[in-house]
Image: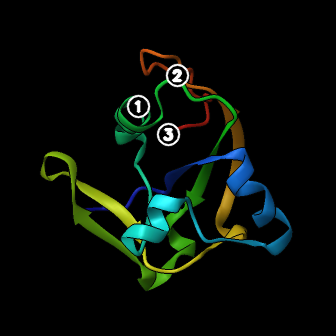
Amino acid sequence: MAEPEFIYKIATEATYEPAREAAVFAGMPIDARDGFIHFSTAEQLAETLRLHFAGKGDLVLLAVRTDDLGAALKWEPSRGGALFPHLYAPLPLSAVAWEAQIAVAADGSCDLPEAVI
């Protein structure tokens, strides 16, 4: 499997805000519980938002360069056996290409930035 150029992390603004100063993001509470930071590919993003963030506002979407993550990035089976990117290290903000504010409707729909590829 060829790695995509970008993978995506969804975080609440409140959880992500301290990382901007620290230049590293440890992830959301579920990431700490699971022992790795969960990401989605562009193809997986809409379903992740629908399943886990329906009705949530005040979210930030991070586009992360896979080439900047090294060996700590693993592709592992998850939902339906699809391979999902998991990072077994804190996320260095130097790997974040861009971030965007997003909100997810109650039905799980979300208007994603055009830059999601």
Q: Residue at x 86, y 68 (%)?
A: 21
Residue picked out by circle 3 = 117
Q: Dot 3: what SS?
A: loop
Q: Position of residue 101 (x, y in %)?
A: 71, 35
Q: Residue at x 56, y 20 (%)?
A: 111
CA–CA distance in space, label 1 to label 3? 12 Å
Q: What amino acid is at disc 3?
A: Ile
Indicate the colouring scheme: rainbow
Mark 3 is surrounded, within 10 Å at the Cα level, by few (under 14), some (14 to 19) or many (20 or more) other residues, namely: few
Vertical side of 29 occupied by 81: above or below? above
Q: Are marks 3 and 2 in contact (CB under 8 Å)?
A: no
Q: What amino acid is at disc 1?
A: Ala
Q: Position of residue 11 (x, y in %)?
A: 60, 49
Q: Dot 2: what SS?
A: loop
Residue picked out by circle 1 = 46
Residue picked out by circle 2 = 110
Mark 1 is surrounded, within 10 Å at the Cα level, by few (under 14), some (14 to 19) or many (20 or more) other residues, namely: some
Q: What amino acid is at disc 2?
A: Cys
- In which quadrant of the rendered image does the N terminus lie? bottom left
Q: Are marks 2 and 1 in contact (CB under 8 Å)?
A: yes
* Residue closest to the eye, 71 or 35: 35
Q: Is residue 64 found left or right of 70 in the rendered image?
A: right
Mark 2 is surrounded, within 10 Å at the Cα level, by few (under 14), some (14 to 19) or many (20 or more) other residues, namely: some
- Residue 68's mark? none
Q: Earlier in the sequence, mark 2 or mark 1?
A: 1
Q: Earlier in the sequence, mark 3 or mark 2?
A: 2
Give the residue furthest to the right: 21
Vertical side of 5 occupied by 95: above or below? below
